[in-house]
Amino acid sequence: MVLVVLAVLAAACTGDTTTETTGADDTTPATTAPGATTTPEDTTPEEPSGEVSNPGLYVHAADDEPLSLDPAQAAAGEAGETVIAQVYERLVEIGPGGPDLIPGLSSEVPTVENGLISEDGLTYTFPIREGVVFHDGSELTADVVKFSWDRALTMALPEGNSSVLSDLVASTEVDGNNFVVTLNERNAAFLNSVVTAAVASIVSQEAVEANGGVEAGAVNDFMTGNMVGTGPYTFSAWNRAENIQLEVFDGYWGEPAALDVRIDQVADTDVRALGLQAGDYDSIETDPTFIDLLEGAEGVTIFSGDFLLEPVHMGMNMNIQADLLPPEDTIPPDFFHDVNVRRGFNLAFDYQAFIDGGLGGLGGVVPHYLPQGMLGYDESLPVFERDLEAAEAAFTEAGYWDEGFTMTVLVEEGGIFEVAGLVLADSMAELNPAFNVQVLAVVEGQFDSAHAEDPFPYAAWVKNADPFADPAALFSAYIHPDGDWGAVHGFRDAYADPDLIASLVDEAAVELDSDRRVEIYQELATLLYEDPVWLIPGNERALMAHRTWIQNFDMNPLWPRPSLKFAYFDK
Amino acid sequence: MQIREYILRRLMILPLIVVGTSIIVFTLSRVGGNPIAIYLEHEMTPAEVAEIEERYGLNDPLPVQYLAWAGGVLTGDMGWSAVSAQPVTEALLDRVGATLELATFAAIVAITMGVGLGTFGGARRDRLPDHLTRVFSISGASMPIFWFAILLLILFWVNLGWVSIGRSDPIIFATIAHPTGLYTIDALLAGSPSAFLDALRYMALPAITLGFGATAIIARMMRSSLVEELNEDYVDAARAKGLPERLVLRRHARRNALIPTVTVIGLGFGFLLQGTVVVEIIFRWPGLGRWMADAVLRGDQATIMAYVLFTSILFLAVNLIVDVMYAYLDRRVVLGA
Amino acid sequence: MVELSAPSRLPLPTHGPLAVRARRFAEVARQVLRNPTTVAGLVIIVALLAMAFLAPLLTTPNAPDPYQMPRDWTMRDVPPGTPGHPLGTTSTGGDVFYGVLWGARTSLQLSVIVVSITVTVGIIVGSLAGFIGGKLDEILMRLVDVFLAIPELIFALAIAAVLGPSFSNIIFALAVVFWVKYARIIRGQIIHIKQNDYVDAARVTGDSRFSIYRKDVLPNSITPVMVQATMDMGGIVLTAATLSFIGLAEAGLAEWGVLVSDGQAGISAGRWWASTFPGLMVFLWALAFNLVGDGLRDVLDPRTEGR
C-alpha cells in the first residue's frame, strides 16, 4: 500500500508543469511544390556533442514489426518494407533529396533522352552495374535480376505486392549485361513507383535456390525470416518481438554505412519517448501528443518534415446492399448517389478538430485527391472547409434534413482512424441531432477482412490511403470509375460524368510529359471538388524525434515508413 | 481409496480433459472467430482471399480442420503464427524460457513473502499486525496488476532510473550463449557476472509485480491454516508443559500449517500464469504472455489456440502434482470425493 | 422436531421459525461487523454503490449514450482541479470524474449480471449432477474439470477475443468462465447431505427429495455461495478491467479498464490522472468485495469459528 501511495505521488510529480492545451505550433509548413525537398524544422538548438550512447550503433525504435522480410511477400506499406529498403536494393532508387531518381543496381536511370526507354514507351533497358557482390559472396548479373523479378511474379503471393509488377510487365529478358523489361502498356509511373518498390528488390539467386527455391503460390520460410541482398547492410538477426539487427556490409559497392543498426520493436508511444530521452534510442516515430514532453528535452531534436503520402480518408459506398447493413442503419442503398449528400458530409466535417485532436495540429486538409507532396499538388486547389450553412442546404436539397438518418461507419480501432470516425460522428450530430453516425471500431484483422468483401458490407469506412509515389496509381485505385474502389463502391453511380473522369485519369497515366500531367490532375481536382467520392479528414505530417548527436538526419516520405535510410547517418 | 489408485485415476482422466479442452479451444476460434482475418491485407480481392483460405485449410469442414490441427499438435506442427512471422512451435519454444524464468522468480517472491506474512499475521491473530497483514495481502489479490505495474514503472523507471523495461540490455545479452533460454542460468553457465546481474536487474520489477498478487493467496491460506493449527490440542498441551511459544510451537505449528498451504500453490500458479499476460505487456517482456496478447488483439487464432492449450496442460499438470503431494502429506484427506 | 446429530456444518438453522432465523442472522452480522477490515470493506462498497446510483445526478449524462465517455476536443488533457473537471480530462476531452462515476455504474451492472447468471447456471448444473448422480454426474464433472483446466483470465481473454470487443461479449465471456465454482459448491452440498444420517431420518418422516433439497441443501449452500459470490463481485470487475485494458472493450466506453488503457500513454508525459483515478477505483472495488468476502468466510467457515 505504501508503495502504491508513493508511486501515485511520484506520478503526480512528474511533468505537471506543462500546460495541456495544444502544444506550441512553431513548425511552419514545409514547401509543398511538386518535387519538394524536405526542410527539417528543428525546434531545439544544437547541443555540443558530448557522450553518445551506443557509439557505432544506430538504434531506431519502431512501432510495429514486419510480417515478412521477403520482398516477394511483404505487403505494400507494412513494416517489412523498411528493413528491405536497408538490406536489398533495386535497379533504380528514389534519391535522398526528393522524388528524383538515382541509379541503383542499374548504372543509369532510363530516360527517353538517353535512349534507354524506347520511343513508344514500352521497353526499358537497365544496364547492370558491374562488380557488385551479394552478402553471401555471389555476383550480381542481369540473370540474377531477371531471377528476382520472375520469382516475385511466379510466387504471386496474395499478401504480397507482386500485382504492381504483373499488371504492367509483359516480359523480362537478359541482353548481355542489360536487363530489358517490356510493358504491356505505357505507364508514367513505372520507374518511380514500380521499379523502386520493395517487391522489385534484387535477391541472391544462390541463397534462394539453396533454401527452398521458387514455387508458385508458396511461401519461402527461409526468405521470410532471412535476407541476402546487395545493400549497405547485412541481415544479422531477427529476435521476434524484440529487435532486428543489421550490420555494415564491408563489401558494399557504394558509399559504406557508418553505423550498425538495431531496430527495436516498441509498440508503446510513451516508452519510445522515454527511451529517446534516456538516450537508449537514436530516433523514434512519435505521436503529436508527445511533442510537449520531447520539445524541451535535452539532446533531443524534433523533426517535422513533409506530409506523409497516406491521407486518412472515408470511403463512401454507392453500392450498398440493404440486407448487409447493420440493423440500425436507416439509409437507403442509393444514399451516396446524391452528390448533395456527399458534399454535405464534406462540408459538415470538422477538419480543425481532427487535425488538432487526432493529428495534434500537425496535418493539413487535402484537395480531392492530391495530397501535399504529390505531383500535381498546388496550394490554390480548392479544398473543403467546414461550412454548416452550406451543409444544411445540401442535406435539405437531398431531402434528409428533417427526417435525419442513422449510418454506421467501420473504422480500425485505436489510433487516428477511430478519432476520425468519432470526429465525424460529433460533426454530424452538431450539424443536426437527427444525423446519427455510429462508429464501429474493430481490430485490424476484422477490418481487413471486411475490406476484402465485395459488395462491401457497410455504408462507409475510414482508413488511410496506400502510400503511392505517383498520382497515376493513386487515381487508378481511388478515383477511376472502374478502378479498384471504383468498381467495389460503384463510382459510376456517383459521378455526374464518369466517362470524363475515366478518360482524364487514363490520359494522365500514359502521358510522359510532366507538365501536361500536372494540368490534367489539377483539372481533375477541380472536378472532384464539385463531385467528391471521398471525405478526406486530413493528411499527417511525418513526425520524428531524434537525438541531436545524429548527423545527416533526413527523411523522404517516398521511402517506406519511417522513411529513413540509416546508411546516410552518423554519430 | 489408495493413493496409487487415486493417481492412476487422475492420470487416466487427464488425456480426456486435455482433449476436451482442445475441442473447446478449437471450437471457440473457428465458430466464434474469424480465423482468416489476420492473414489478410487490406484491399485484397476475393480471389486472393480464396487463395489464402486454401493455404491455411480454412475451407475444409470443421471436423477435418480439427483433426488436422490436433494431429499437428501431436507431431509438433501447430501452424503459422502470424503475429511473430514464424511457425507456432518455433515461436512457442523461443518464448517459453522467458516466461518460465519470470514465473519462477515471481513464485519465489510469492512463496517467501506469502509464508512469511501468513505466519506473522496468523501468530498474532486478530491483533493489529494480523489486520494489517491481512489487508496487505488482500490488497495484493485485489490489485489490478496493470495499474500496479504502471505505478511501479513510474517510480522506479521514470523517476529513479534504477530499472529498465525489457528483458536485458541487448549488448550484454549478445555476449553470452543461450543454451537453455533462461537468461540467469545461461549467465551462470557462461560464468559471466555482468550478464547475471543484467538478468536480475531487468527481472526484479516484473517478478515483484507478478508475485505480489500470488503472495496474497499464499499468505491468506498460511494464516488461516496456522490459526487452525494453533488451536489444536497438541499446541495447548505443549503450552501447558511450558515450552517456549516462539521456538518450538511456532515451528511445529508452522510445519503442519504448510501442508494445506501447498494446495494453494496450484491456485497461485494459475494466478502467476494469468498475470504474466499483463506483466509481460507492460514490461515488454518477450515471453508467451505478450505473444498471446498480440494474438488476441489481432485475431491470430493459431497462436491463441496454441497458447490456451499449452497453459491449460501446464495448469492441469501442476494441479495434479499438487493434489498428489497433498494426498501424500495428509492422509486425512478424503481421496476421490 | 428432533434434530439428529448431523454436524450441520454451518451455524445457520435448517428449520425453525422466522424469529430464530432473524436472531441467528443478527448474530452473524454482529460477528462480521466486529472485524474492522470487513467494516472498512462495507463502507467502501456503500460509497461505490452511492457513486453508481448518483452518477446521473452528480454529472450530466452524455447524450445519446450516457455510457459513452463525452468528448470535447477543446478540453483535452486538462489536469485535475480545473474548474468543471475536478479529476481532469482524458486525451479526447472526457471528464475523468464522469468516467469514475459512470464506470461504477458499468461495473455494478456488469458484476450483478454476471453473478446472477453464474449462480443460476451453477446451481442448476450442480443440482443435476448431485441429485441424478451416476453417469450424468461423471459427465458434468468432467466438463467442469475441462473448464477449470483453463486459467480464468486466459479463458475469458480467448472468448472475448474471438467474439469481438463489446460490453455484452465481455459479460458472456465472464459468465462462461465463472459459473463452475457454484456448480461444485452445490454438488458438494448435495453429496454431503446424501451421505448424512438425517436424510434417512427425514425420508422416514416422508419428506420428498425436493423438500430435502429446499430445506437442507439450499439453506446450507447459501453461505458458501454467498461468500463466493461476494468475492466474485470483486473478481469479475477486476477481470473485466484487465480485458478492457488489454484492448477488448468497445471504444469510448465509460469503463475503468478502458480509461486506464487510454490514459496509459500519457503517463510518461506527466498526464497521470487519466489512468490513476480509474485504476484506483478498480482496486478499491475489488478490495472492498474481497475484504467483505473474506470477513464473511471467517465468520461462516466452521474451521475457524468460535475461537
Image (spheres, coloured by chain):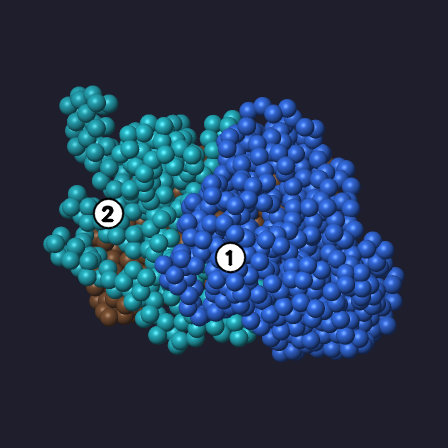
**Residue B74 at least partly seen:** yes
Q: Which image quadrant is residue C144 in?
A: bottom left
Q: What is the three-letter code of the residue carrying label 1?
A: Ile
- Towards the viewer: A350 or C284: A350
Q: What residue is disc 1 on?
A: A202
Q: Which chain is brown?
A: C
Distance between the Cα atoms at labels 2 and 1? 58 Å
Tag 2's secondary structure? helix
Subunit under mark 1? A
What residue occupies the far front of the structure in this picture?
A: A176
Q: Which image quadrant is residue B230 in?
A: top left
Horizontal arrangement in the rendering, residue A207 relative to residue A174 (left or right): left
Q: Which mark is residue C263?
A: none
Give x and y (percent) for residue C33: 44, 39
Name the front one of labels 2 and 1. 1
Give x and y (percent) for residue B39: 49, 64
Tag 1's secondary structure? loop
Query: Which hue is chain A drawn in?
Result: blue
Subunit under mark 2? B
Q: Which image quadrant is residue A421 in?
A: bottom right
- Towards the viewer: B198 or C274: B198
Q: What residue is disc 2 on?
A: B322
Query: Residue at image x 42%, y 46%?
Result: A237
Is the same chain shared between marks 2 and 1? no
